Image (cartoon, rainbow, N blue to C red):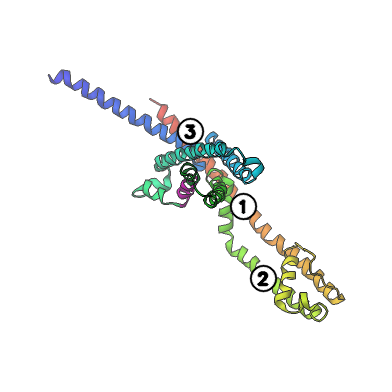
């Protein structure tokens, strides 16, 4: 009896192991499609490219829906579209929760899926489903207007599918000290410019430059090179100070631009190096799995 029973148990165990291996492969492939850092090729994966297009289309629809000429008589169409998009985002959210254990960031921690669900990226994904819930339940005009605003925040999901967005955020974090110095210099220039124009133009134009707080508006739009033109100096000394402050503003605008450009270039180079190493590891892993 043992002879007839043993092969069935071995065969059943073999099928179970094969099923688990197939499930892991599917989960790994889905993870590569959804996680930009796991995608071994250049650019976005097909799934993330489709999600990016869907996000832009839903935001465009949200903007168009606020125009009565467009939305009049088509409320059911916009609501049906909202429910369909919400279903897609809900499915994406479920797949991200299922595949998060493939990521090194979460697989090394206890309760990886619970930690992922409570993370900020997962909360952004979940928030994208909220408008669909309101569309199904209905609501007052005020609530629907709030939902339209919330739908715009779906653009925040683009940070999940684009390395460039992550690289820009990382560049800002890495150079935050230099950027804070640039902001401090700009504040000093604004206050200094307002003080000079108060001294030069205060008696001539007291309504616009009669105090330093009044002159601050002019100084802000001048240093930031906006120049609305609602307040302009008329005295020769005021014009001289205005020219100097305008030149200072141009230099201050260029300072953070150069800092961010250099930091962004460094981050992108590191990302390319990581992508190359990730592709090499993925190819080696695939080769090991295919080898007998």
Q: What element carries label 2?
A: helix
Q: Is mark 1 on a helix, strand or loop?
A: helix
Give the residue at mark 3. 283
Q: Is label 2 or label 3 in front?
A: 2
Q: Residues within 10 Å of mark 2 (few under 14, many from 20)?
A: some
Q: In this rendering, is residue 290 above or below 122?
A: above
What number is the disc on residue 187?
2
Point out the residue furthest to the left here. 1
Q: Give the left or right position of residue 251, taking residue 8 as reference.
A: right
| Residue 24 rendering spot, x and y as whole percentages | 38, 34
Name the residue: 40% across, 26% down: 291
Q: Does the magenta stretch include residue 57?
A: no
Instruction: Confirm whether residue 44 shows in the render.
Output: no
| Residue 93 rendering spot, x and y as whole percentages | 45, 42
Q: In which quarter of the image is the C terminus?
A: top left
Q: Give the range drawn in magenta.
A: 120-128
Return the disc, 2 or 1, that comes first in the chain's sequence. Answer: 2
Name the residue: 18% across, 22% down: 6
Q: In which quarter of the image is the N terminus?
A: top left
Q: Is label 3 or label 1 in front?
A: 1
Mark 2 to mark 1: distance in Å?
25 Å
| Nearer to us in this view, 48 or 81 | 81
Instruction: Confirm whether residue 158 shows in the render.
Output: yes
What number is the disc on residue 264?
1
């Amino acid at each position: 009896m043992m002879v007839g029973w043993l092969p069935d148990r071995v065969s059943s165990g073999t099928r179970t192991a094969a099923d688990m291996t197939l499930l892991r492969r599917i989960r790994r492939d889905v993870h590569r499609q959804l996680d930009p850092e796991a995608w071994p090729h250049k650019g976005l994966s097909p799934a993330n490219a489709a999600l990016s297009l869907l996000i832009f289309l839903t935001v465009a629809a949200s903007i168009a829906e606020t125009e009565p000429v467009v939305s009049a008589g088509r409320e059911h169409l916009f609501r049906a579209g909202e429910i369909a998009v919400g279903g897609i985002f809900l499915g994406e959210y479920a797949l991200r929760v299922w595949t998060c254990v493939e990521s090194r960031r979460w697989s090394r921690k206890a309760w990886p899926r619970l930690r992922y669900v409570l993370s900020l990226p997962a909360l952004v994904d979940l928030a994208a489903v909220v408008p669909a819930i309101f569309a199904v339940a209905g609501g007052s005009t005020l609530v629907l207007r709030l939902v339209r605003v919330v739908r715009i925040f779906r653009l925040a999901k683009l940070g999940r599918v684009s390395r460039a967005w992550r690289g820009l955020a990382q560049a800002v974090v890495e150079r935050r000290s230099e950027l804070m110095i640039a902001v401090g210099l700009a504040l000093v220039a604004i206050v200094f410019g307002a003080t000079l124009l108060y001294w030069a133009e205060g008696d001539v134009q007291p309504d616009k430059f009669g105090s330093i707080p009044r002159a601050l508006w002019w100084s802000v739009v001048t240093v930031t090179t906006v120049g609305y033109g609602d307040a302009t100096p008329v005295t020769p000394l005021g014009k001289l100070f205005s020219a100097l402050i305008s030149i200072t503003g141009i230099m201050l605008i260029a300072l953070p631009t150069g800092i961010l450009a250099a930091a962004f270039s460094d981050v992108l180079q590191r990302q390319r190096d990581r992508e190359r190493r990730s592709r090499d590891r993925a190819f080696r892993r695939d080769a090991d799995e295919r080898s007998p």
